[in-house]
Image (cartoon, rainbow, N blue to C red):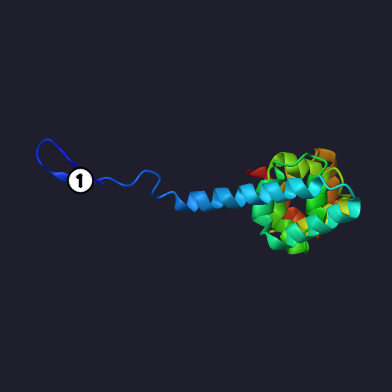
């Protein structure tokens, strides 16, 4: 569309909605993923439910799933986490998700499982993720972690 101003200068105006193609695609992906997760969590039988969740967890990136998890009921979030394909996916998911989702997942994980997760994270990310657990549990998990990495996490947490 071309617009002519008072001084007869022509200026091209962008088409309304142009430039938001990437946002539109991302929004569509988010909506599609959320809808699939909602459908999977509303299945009648548990077997179909877990099968669908596992399939979705393998088809999408951990980052997309981390974002979508925030829209699920709190008790459904650990089910999604447990069905991620591997530890690397779980690490990415936990780094990228929101505080409420981390809380929901940490409530069902034992200290050893949290330790395994933290072992695979960079120390700076581990500090940020561990901020979401109670202090008492934080100390227990740090005792389980390799002493060098534990010291690194403690030092970084002093500065955060």
The one of 76 and 107 positioned closer to us in this rendering? 76
Residue 156 placed where, x, y %?
66, 49
The one of 87 and 111 positioned closer to us in this rendering? 87
Residue 49 placed where, x, y %?
84, 52
Residue 145, visible in the rendered structure: no
| Crowd around label 1: few <14 · some 14–19 · many ≥20 (10 Å) | few
Q: Considering the image in quadrants, where does the C terminus appear?
A: top right
Residue plotted at (78% across, 52% down): 80
Residue 18, visible in the rendered structure: yes
Q: Which residue is mark 1?
A: 11
Residue plotted at (68% across, 59% down): 60
Q: Secondary structure at mark 1?
A: strand
Residue plotted at (90% across, 55% down): 47
* Left or right for 19, reference 154: left
Residue 141 placed where, x, y %?
84, 50
The one of 88 and 22 positioned closer to us in this rendering? 22
Residue plotted at (66% across, 59% down): 61
């Amino acid at each position: 569309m071309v617009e002519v101003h008072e001084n007869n200068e022509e200026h091209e105006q962008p088409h309304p909605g142009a430039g938001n193609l990437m946002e539109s695609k991302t929004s569509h992906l988010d909506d599609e993923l959320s809808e699939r997760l909602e459908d999977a969590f509303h299945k009648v039988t548990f077997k179909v439910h877990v099968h669908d969740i596992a399939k979705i967890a393998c088809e999408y990136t951990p980052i997309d799933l981390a974002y979508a998890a925030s829209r699920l009921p709190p008790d459904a979030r650990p089910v999604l986490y447990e069905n991620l394909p591997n530890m690397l996916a779980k690490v990415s998911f936990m780094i990228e998700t929101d505080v409420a989702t981390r809380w929901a997942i940490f409530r069902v994980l034992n200290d050893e499982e949290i330790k395994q997760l933290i072992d695979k994270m960079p120390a700076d990310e581990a500090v940020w993720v561990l901020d979401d657990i109670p202090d008492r549990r934080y100390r227990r998990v740090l005792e389980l972690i390799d002493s060098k990495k534990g010291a690194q996490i403690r030092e970084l947490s002093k500065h955060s």
